[in-house]
Amino acid sequence: MVRVLALVSMLSSSLAWAQGPIVGDVEGGAFRPFPLAVPVVRGDAATAGAAKTVTQVLRADLEMSGAFQLLDDRSFLDSDGTTPDAMRFADWQNVGAQGVVKAQLSTTGGALSLALYAYEVAAQKTVLDKKLSGAVDDVRGLAHAAADEVFRAFTGEPGPFRSKIAVVKKVQGEKHVFVVDVDGEGARQVTRGGGLNLLPSWSPDGRSLLFTSYRFDNPDLFEQPVDGGLAKPLSRRPGLNTGGKVSPDGTKIAVTLSQDGNSELYLLDRGGGVMKRLTDQWGIDTSPSWSPDGSQLAFVSSRSGHPDIYVMASSGGAAKRLTFKGEYNQTPAFSPRGTHVAFTARDERNAFDIFVVNLTTNELKRITQGQGNNEEPSFSPNGRLLVFTTTRNKSRQLVVANLDGTKQTVLSASMGEHTSPAWGPFIR
């Protein structure tokens, strides 16, 4: 558990935010990553090992975001102090740093305490002055919390680094749902038994996961608390009960059922009762994804003759087709900002890649190309990043990428076969 112990809000920081975030949205050809220096976190003999870990994780998180260009620590000397009165801004400006992050790690009452500072160099302003506390056995969690704070200080948006990713992994011939950190570390198995447990999705509060399981020899929909407890059946109707997604307000579930012989979209209440059938087409309708306000659903339909991405009102009705290129488009994911839909498409080489469509401009961006098969995108809770699977290194690993694909990080901890990543909500 990581806690914010104290916050000193500097006047200069307030003035900086009145002028808007320092680092803008990571989209468009004009964007350039913000040059940021992150010196080694300082500590004493008792915290030296933990300080090294915090440094490594903090740097990796910020680099992975694509918002920052971290300066090589061999290019500067960290000879000034950590606090505002000890900063020598001219020295940092001379090495090309536009921002600097400083931290001091200590132990207090059996817990770790991190004094965290961030500075805008040209304006000589303090944009972050906080103290974080974490358990001595959760150093990485403390580092992820620090990365969240730094990200917010420079972008004005919450960071995603303390959130979790649900993913399916092979375990001794079975497939189970795991929860991992955003860097792929800290894998923890959630499901037990059932043989095949697939297609996880999060409840809006992050406390439970929906998934499809074959534990009763049929693809049935279940829900299970993330932190333990029994899996509860939500839908065990004949045929498919797959792709269940809870609405943003937590009151409904969009799901694919084939109880009437064809794969169609339905709304269920939170207990699994049918509220409404949403589609009635000759083709297959599947893979629903909620818009952040709950008013729309993106989904896959073969009504055009092959799988394409559509959007319709979550109450049903006419659907708008989003994809007109390619003959196999699948696994749509609505951005938490409501501005984009990411999806998987098969190209002319029969390779699968990740695409993102802007719902306002209809602009289509290709995120991956010539990097093996890339599938099943899911947005970070702040909408700035995607996680998806890739075969670029033979095994199916996880990748975190920004929305134009210029920064892609293969999570080295995700060796082995991984499928169906689902990025969870913010940790409150």
Image (tube, rainbow, N blue to C red):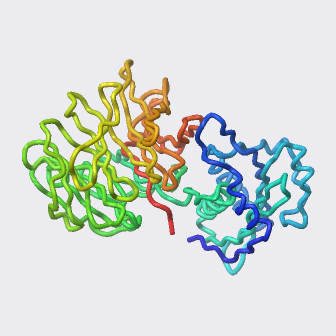
Relative to residue 226, is residue 336 depicted above or below?
A: above
Write the residue at 62% across / 34% down: 29
Write the residue at 76% across / 59% down: 41
On screen, residue 159 versus residue 104, left or right, reads left
Q: Dividing the picture into quarters, in which one does residue 227 lie?
A: bottom left
In the foreground, 253 or 235: 253
Write the residue at 71% across / 63% down: 18
Query: Can residue 309 be seen at all in this image of the molecule?
Result: yes
In the foreground, 267 or 3: 267
Q: Residue 327's x, y, as percent? A: 30, 25
Write the residue at 16% across / 43% down: 263
Q: Dividing the picture into quarters, in which one does residue 201 lie?
A: bottom left
Q: Residue 286's x, y, as percent? A: 24, 43
Relative to residue 387, is residue 29 depicted above or below?
A: above
Q: How many marks?
A: 0
Query: Can residue 219 be seen at all in this image of the molecule?
Result: no
Q: Residue furthest top?
A: 349
Q: Check the picture and name the quadrant holding the N terminus.
A: bottom right
Q: Dividing the picture into quarters, in which one does residue 249 lie?
A: bottom left
Q: Residue 211's x, y, as percent? A: 28, 55
On screen, residue 89 versus residue 409, left or right, reads right
Relative to residue 424, is residue 173 depicted above or below?
A: above
Q: Residue furthest bottom?
A: 109
In the foreground, 178 or 327: 327
Relative to residue 354, is residue 161 depicted above or below?
A: below
Q: Residue 217's x, y, as percent? A: 14, 50
In the foreground, 294 or 371: 294
